């Protein structure tokens, strides 16, 4: 069965008011009836600005990467994009066709 996987790339410090942005987005995806979403906290990474983010001494972070992965039908995933793009101007969102076993 073919589905569409959406990955949204954020930083640990991205926020939306008092809540972390990844939490706001997962709740939004639930509200939009997307089948499921997972937040993955990266150990280390860098983006278009070339700054490496990683865990530092004593576990203190300097803004590590976060990826939200959601999988559903292509129609449902694509229908969320206009609203997500309004919430995430400039964020990297990728779409990949996947096969569910």
Image (spheres, helix red, strand yellow):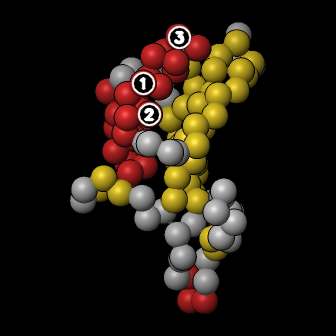
Label 3 vs label 2, nearer the camera: 2
**Where 7 falls versus 83 (above or below)?**
below
Label 3 neighbour load within 10 Å: few <14, some 14-19, many 20+ = few
Label 3 vs label 1, nearer the camera: 1
Mark 2 and mark 1 in contact? Answer it, CB < 8 Å. yes
Q: CA distance from mark 3 to mark 2?
A: 16 Å
Label 2 neighbour load within 10 Å: few <14, some 14-19, many 20+ = few
Residue depicted at x 58% and y 43%: 92
Instruction: Tell me if I can see residue 30 in this picture.
Output: no
User: Could you say whether the residue bearing mark 3 is in a helix, strand or loop?
Assistant: helix
**Where 78 falls versus 66 (above or below)?**
above
* Circle 1 residue: 82
User: Could you say whether the residue bearing mark 1 is in a helix, strand or loop?
Assistant: helix
Residue furthest to the bottom in view is: 57
User: Could you say whether the residue bearing mark 2 is in a helix, strand or loop?
Assistant: helix
- 63 displayed left or right of 23: right
* Circle 3 residue: 75
* Circle 2 residue: 85
Residue depicted at x 56% and y 82%: 59
Q: CA distance from mark 2 to mark 1?
A: 5 Å
Q: Nearer the viewer, residue 44 or 37?
A: 44
Residue furthest to the left in view is: 18
Quadrant of the frame with the N terminus:
top right
Residue depicted at x 64% and y 34%: 94
């Amino acid at each position: 069965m073919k589905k569409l996987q959406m990955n949204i790339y954020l930083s640990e410090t991205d926020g939306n008011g008092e809540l972390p942005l990844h939490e706001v987005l997962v709740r939004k995806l639930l509200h939009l009836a997307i089948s499921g979403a997972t937040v993955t906290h990266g150990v280390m990474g860098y983006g278009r600005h070339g700054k490496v983010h990683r865990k530092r001494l004593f576990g203190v972070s300097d803004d590590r990467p976060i990826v939200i992965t959601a999988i559903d039908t292509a129609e449902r995933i694509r229908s969320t994009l206009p609203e997500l793009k309004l919430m995430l101007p400039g964020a990297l969102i990728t779409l990949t066709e996947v096969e569910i076993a």
